Amino acid sequence: MEGFPRKSVVNKLLVSYAETSDSKLLERAFGLVERAFEEGKQTLFEKETLMYLALALARCSRPVPASIILRKLIRMEEYPPVTAWSAILAYMSLSSSGAYLSAELILETGYLFLDNRIDPRKKSNAPLIAMKPNTIAIGVALAGCLMSGTTRIAEQLLDIMPRIGVKIDANLLVLMAQIYEKNGRKEELKKLKRHFDEAHNLNDVQLRQYYNCLLSCHLKFGDLDSASQMVLEMLRKAKEASNSLAAATLKFEPAKEGNLSHSPKVSDAMELGTEDKGGYQLGSLISFDDFCRDRNFISLEGEAKKILMYLSMNLQKQVELIMTERGILQATEKAYVKLAKAFLEAGKTKELAEFLIKVEKEDSPSSVEDSALIDVINSCISLGLLDRAHDLLDEMRFAGIKASTSVYSSLLKAYCKEKRMNEVTSLWREVRRAGIQLEASCYEALIQSKVLQKDTQGALHLFKEMKEAKLPRVGHRGFEVLAGSSAKSSEAGFMAKLLEEIKEGEVVDCGVHDWNNVIHFFCKKRLMQDAEKALKKMRSLGHTPNAQTFHSMVTGYAAIGGKYIEVAELWGELKSLAAATSMKFDQELLDSLLYTFVRGGFFVRANEVVEMMEKGKMFVDKYRYRTLFLKYHKTLYKGKTPKYQTEAQSKKREAALAFKKWVGLF
């Protein structure tokens, strides 16, 4: 046929394609919609037909065409109710690119409702108000962004929530906490504590997620005092609860084994359902007739809620530092490992010893094992941090805690191996003073070190002492075997995890997070001169800016407008910094740069950003940039090429035409 058939035929065709849920047929349907819009035939489509097609596309992992249809509906002023388009967003949010698009769509539509600019008293505004993003729509977008790691655009959603009047429920509170933790917003995270403490509808899992975020943020900022106090407070509460429960059991029931087992809670049931089945299990697509009959789209809202629950359960699996037992929050072994590592990296040996001694004195059944401090000392010896190990031993001695013979033996042998004879002499003196009897392998190592020093008299004296103690003598080969088996057995449990964390974990510059917060505050308030001064001070103090630092600067410049030269200078600095350091570009930083360059007409640099994003296989929302180009540069380079133009002018023209071709405008 030439042209399009009548309206009823077109809509029936699109509906029949959508109901098949076949990828190829859905692509055909979307192609038909795009062609009709290009030719100005958008009146051919019914609102419900386009909504149904968008739902089918989103369910079949086609978030880009689904988002384009939603945008076209809004442009046509055929506003889809939030109960319907929240389900489309939910299916989109199951993929990383779809989650990013969901956040963009909410930001675009949320802009219409900022600060009560829509009058609800006008009847003509009713369809528009029915589209306003609600708790579920924002929840699925936030959860999707958290799953894919695009948390800076998620924070932009948090910023507009109070301005469009979105009600915050328990799920949103948890998502907010997780986003603030990922972005290092320590103060905002602390402010949420009051809401969590006062909320009555939170379950154990949600509380655990919040306190996991809080502890993680303390560690991220190097606030070890707050982190250790938080863990000790949880230990004290767990001990009090355990004592109270034990007393109640003795009072009301006879003492029997298994008496303290607790009945399943709502949180336990939720955890049982978090087994990953390789992705969200789709049901069958609702028929178009049922879709149209459900005028308020209650069934679609139910689907969005199910997906939100699925995403929330997947996020629960990321909780590593806090667990709950009988409703009582407690730190996991992973939390103790991370704390020990942070104390060691900060050189706070005394504070680490004091913390672990307090932990052991609490004597909580769920606390770290009694040998935690010994494990840390053994870990330090294994890693060659002998001075730290010696300092920890001294702190144990000052606290009146007697260390085992094996620890002194390990440290002495390590000193002997490193030929640090002054430390060997000092530690040997401590051992003698404490009346500790060392094992034969340690005497063997000491004798060998004396021989190497040509101290024959000292070696004979040690041999005589070992003989008097009636210790079995081992040869050099026996010493190696004994030392190897000892190390192997000691690296079980806590020590093995600590060694792994120290070896594999990155050393974090805590100061970067503090300065990022300062710069973010100034950029948010559009105080860019202060932000520039803060960035300069940050560098002068030896802190290297990261992707989050530059993202704040770029979005700050974009907010006040016209600062394209400053952004171009940042881009040049970013490229040189990435070449010289390990700093990596991420999607959100490059996307913010691309938006600024396209809006300002800096197409040479825009093409550089596009090339970098495509090289890194990052998602780019071409529809958004096509719209942006048409808004600000519709008539740019439309005429014939001038006969006379400079090399710079020719380069700019070629770059603009290349970008125009990339977004699909010709």
Image (cartoon, rainbow, N blue to C red):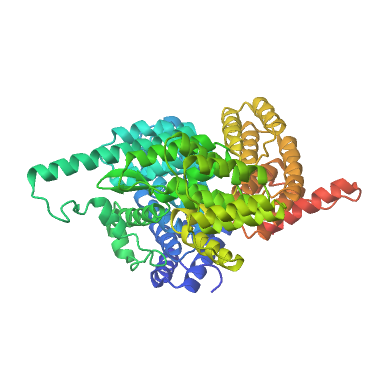
User: Quadrant where the C terminus lies?
Assistant: bottom right
Name the residue: 49% across, 67% down.
29
Name the residue: 43% across, 47% down.
372
User: Left or right: where does residue 128 sit relative to residue 238?
Assistant: right
| Image spot of residue 70 (x, y percent) | 47, 53
Any part of residue 129 in sight: no
| Image spot of residue 198 (x, y percent) | 29, 32
What is the count of numbered marks? 0
| Image spot of residue 515 (x, y percent) | 61, 32
Nearest the viewer among 666 and 540 is 540
Any part of residue 86 in sight: yes
Nearest the viewer among 235 and 130 is 235
User: Left or right: where does residue 67 sit relative to residue 306?
Assistant: right
* Residue 220 versus residue 375 in the image, above or below: above
Asked where in the image residue 492 lies, by quadrant, the reply is: bottom left
Name the residue: 35% across, 35% down.
233
Name the residue: 49% across, 57% down.
496
User: Left or right: where does residue 299 sit relative to residue 493?
Assistant: left
Asked where in the image residue 229 lies, by quadrant, the reply is: top left
| Image spot of residue 77 (x, y percent) | 45, 46
Nearest the viewer among 114 and 208 is 208
User: Left or right: where does residue 522 sit relative to residue 282?
Assistant: right
